[in-house]
Image (spheres, grey):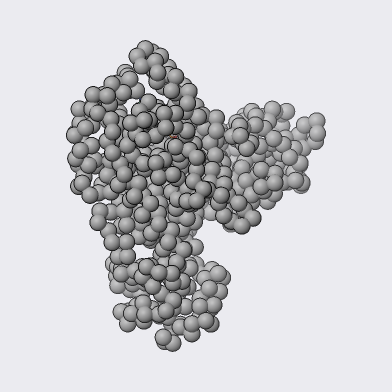
Amino acid sequence: MNRPLPPTAPADERAIDQTLAQWVLQRTGSNLLATAVRVVSNAEGRGHSCAWLSDPDTGAGFDTEALAAIRRHAWVGDGRHFTPFVLDARNRFYLWRNWQHEAKLAAAIRLRCRQRTLPIPADILEGDLDALFAGMPPGITDWQRAAVAAVPGARFFVLTGGPGTGKTTTVVRMLLMLLRRARACGLPSQPSIALAAPTGKAAQRLVQAIARGKAELQVSLSQCGSAPDLQELLQHIPHADARTLHRLLGYRPMDNTFSHGPRNPLAEDIVVVDEASMVDLAMMRQLLEALRPDAVLILLGDPSQLASIDAGSVLADIVASTPPNRLPPAMANLLAPWLQNAPGTATDDAPLAGQVLTLTYSWRAGSGLQRGIEALRDTPDPAWLDTLLSARADGDLHLRHCPSPRALRSCVDGWIDRHAELLQTLLTLPVEAGAALQSLHQLQILCALRDGPFGAHGLNELIARRLAARFGIDSGHAWHHGRPLIITRNDYARGLFNGDVGIALQGAEGLRVWFELGDRDGNTGLRSFSPRALPAHESAWAITIHRSQGSEYRDVAVVLPPDEDNRILTRELVYTAISRARSHAEIWATDESLRAALARPIRREGGLRERLRPDQDPRK
Ligand SMILES: Nc1ncnc2c1ncn2[C@@H]1O[C@H](COP(=O)(O)OP(=O)(O)OP(=O)(O)O)[C@@H](O)[C@H]1O
């Protein structure tokens, strides 16, 4: 085993990758194993749950002899028993923990999917759908109806779609359906519901979205006048309390464990998790294992967005494991009468068929921004990009040429001009904290990078200087009235968490930093802190696109570095950024870097999607 290292030194090697490899080398004396460990550690750092030791497309990497030697090593197994590393039959190499997360998560999902029943007879379903979709045309609401009709009897359900496709509108109806037919679905007569999301920001947005969805449905139900019990049941859907997944599962930062798991499952009968694309492999396994077998899990999200920061691309893998919107034959027959377009059918043994549905009709369609979002969801349409590059704008989506720091300065000046009124109010007038925090939802600069002149740090410094010059702020002081900032480290004692956005405001007590925070009972309220009491933080005129996930703003400016070879530039990154905008987005980039980003989809290595396909032997 002491052969020279194969030529597989990973790009972007981190100190931890080398340290781990060194440790393995010292204990095993095997260069080969140490090299494979270096590769897999590096892969994990880039979000992969495993590393291919032999590329399935090119065959590059470790040769057959090297692979056989690694496979024979005592520290490497096939996953049946504990070994520090696992090499599967397809030459995917795992750290034991990621192998376990994948295997256990896939097994938990498959088990839940096998339990599905179709407990509601067709005539009852018809009445329910008529009441819940009164006045809504069939055709464009087909997949919303299908989701509402398919959720009874499911223990695991995934509803996906791009922005504005009606996920909230639909999930409120799905919950109402479960409440009305609870006993038939094997739930208590008044099932309890938990709402959760991966970040505090996303949880706040979920609260607002559910409250709005409930109010809209309330109007529709009272207008149609039928089924008064539905109006009563609607009150049982919570809308003031959504927790982060960490809080839902009882995260204990002292020892990095959770109080809820298989031995202490969650009490709730129905758990809804929004922004599921941000949930990594380890967290999703924890969630699945913390559910009672008879509880229902509903995941909402958009698999085209950036995947989780930590390893895995769980939502995208789940969605890709089953053909889109194909139903098992029995379900297709049951639903056919209410769908204008006959649904395609899946094979009977497809584990997730009928439990993963995608909403395809955008209710915000028609704007240039929406066209851009749709064009970027899958493989970008080259004609769309060419048109945009030559016209420089499509309605509310704009391109600004930004090849240099000098061009960036003029983009910033233009941005300040366009938002001058709002910025002036924030920076120079007394403003109430709630209103000031609300106005931060109006505009946001999103950067692909954190560091460098085109990164969020550089942009924040540049913006601070330009604002100081324009509005007469003392540029010698970082702390000034109207400065937005984002917390970058959790502070459990103060209840401030990574990603919380606040604003510094001068008041009777001097300069205080205000946040809208949730308390332990799920209520949100305004709280202020002295700047000295804050955990690690930075200015937030510009934040990274990764940080913006789960948030939404009226106007967004997206900054891409002009270096088109930068590996950060991917289609998912640009899609995630512009889909944060409700009304207007501008992209500050060169044509080349935009083209390069759109041509580079993220591919995360892992075996989850295969494990969820029909008849998979988990060790393959
Ligand atoms: N069946 C429907 N009939 C009429 N309007 C609808 C329907 N479904 C959704 N809408 C409207 O479309 C808009 C977007 O819907 P919704 O908020 O449910 O989408 P979403 O997918 O949750 O959006 P986002 O991802 O941005 O949170 C809302 O204004 C909603 O009222």
**Where on the picture, by quarter, is residue 107?**
bottom left
**Where on the picture, by quarter, is residue 363?**
top left
**Which residue lies most toward the bottom here?**
2
Q: Is residue 594 above or below residue 150?
A: below
Residue 466: percent from the left, percent from the top?
66, 43
Q: In the image shown, does 366 or 407 lie closer to the viewer? A: 366
Q: Is residue 90 above or below residue 200?
A: below
- Res. 587 visible in picture: no
Q: In the image shown, does 241 or 312 lie closer to the viewer? A: 241
Residue 592: percent from the left, percent from the top?
41, 54
Quadrant housing the C terminus: bottom left
**Which residue lies most toward the right here?**
509
Residue 610: percent from the left, percent from the top?
30, 57
- Res. 508 visible in picture: yes
Name which residue lies at 43% across and 69% down.
Answer: 82
Quadrant housing the N terminus: bottom left
Residue 527: percent from the left, percent from the top?
69, 35
Name which residue lies at 30% across and 69% down.
Answer: 89
Name which residue lies at 30% across and 35% down.
Answer: 150
Residue 446 relative to residue 504: left or right? left
- The number of numbered discs placed on residues in the rendered structure image is 0
**Where on the picture, by quarter, is residue 520?**
top right
Name which residue lies at 60% across and 51% down.
Answer: 252
Q: Is residue 513 above or below residue 125?
A: below
Residue 243 relative to residue 125: left or right? right
Q: Quadrant of ligand 1?
A: top left
